[in-house]
Image: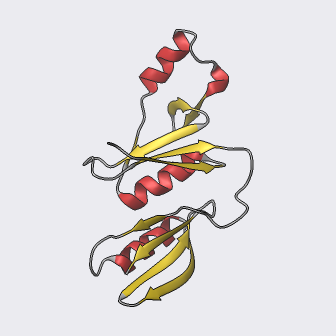
């Protein structure tokens, strides 16, 4: 079985690029397929945009682990803004001793540090992505 994590957001293309860069994922782009759907009348121009010079779907974009080990992340546009704490969030475990570097990478990509946590021997940093979705990086 494969797992896809869907994330509601305001700007799926920008958020997809944040997560792809943070997790060393690749943004899934298939402009030829999008163009074929337009040509066949399966989609309209309103269904598409050109983002960073690439024809893509206007309301969703995905990124995936090039090694096929991690879940696919799908970012989909919703009209409402995030209002409360996430009920589900991603916990990233970069490996022993690599947490601080990954936190710095996330901050450099536009994340916001919320707090540090600890429970017994486990330590982590809770951050928010550019749209405020919480996630944790283990120390």
Q: Nearer the viewer, residue 113 or 80?
A: 80
Report the number of discs: 0
Q: Position of residue 18 (x, y in %)?
A: 49, 56
The image position of residue 100, as x and y in percent, is 38, 80
Q: Nearer the viewer, residue 88 or 65?
A: 88
Q: Is residue 114 left or right of residue 18?
A: right
Q: Residue furthest top?
A: 40
Relative to 33, residue 107 above or below: below
Give the residue drawn at x 49%, y 19%. 35
Quadrant for the N terminus, please: top left
Query: Eyeballing the image, is 49 above or below 18?
Result: above
Q: Residue at 67% x, 24% y: name it.
A: 46
Q: Quadrant of the C terminus?
A: bottom left
Where residue 12 appears, as percent x and y from the top left, is 58, 45
State the image coordinates of residue 17 (x, y, percent, origin top left).
48, 51
In the rendered image, the vertical position of residue 65 relative to residue 119, given as above or below: above
Query: Observer-nearest residue: 92 or 57?
Result: 92
Residue, x 37% and y 50% (percent of image)?
Answer: 71
């Amino acid at each position: 079985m494969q797992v896809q994590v869907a994330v509601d957001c305001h700007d799926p293309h920008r958020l997809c690029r944040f997560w792809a860069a943070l997790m060393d994922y690749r943004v899934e782009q298939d402009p030829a397929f999008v163009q074929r759907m337009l040509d066949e009348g399966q989609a309209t121009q309103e269904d598409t945009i050109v983002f960073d010079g690439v024809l893509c779907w206007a309301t969703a974009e995905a990124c995936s682990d090039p090694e096929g080990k991690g879940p696919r992340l799908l970012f989909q546009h919703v009209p409402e803004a995030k209002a409360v704490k996430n009920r589900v969030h991603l916990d990233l475990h970069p490996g022993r001793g690599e947490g601080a570097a990954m936190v710095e990478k996330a901050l450099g990509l536009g994340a916001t540090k919320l707090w540090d946590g600890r429970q017994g021997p486990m330590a982590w940093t809770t951050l928010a992505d550019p749209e405020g979705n919480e996630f944790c990086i283990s120390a």
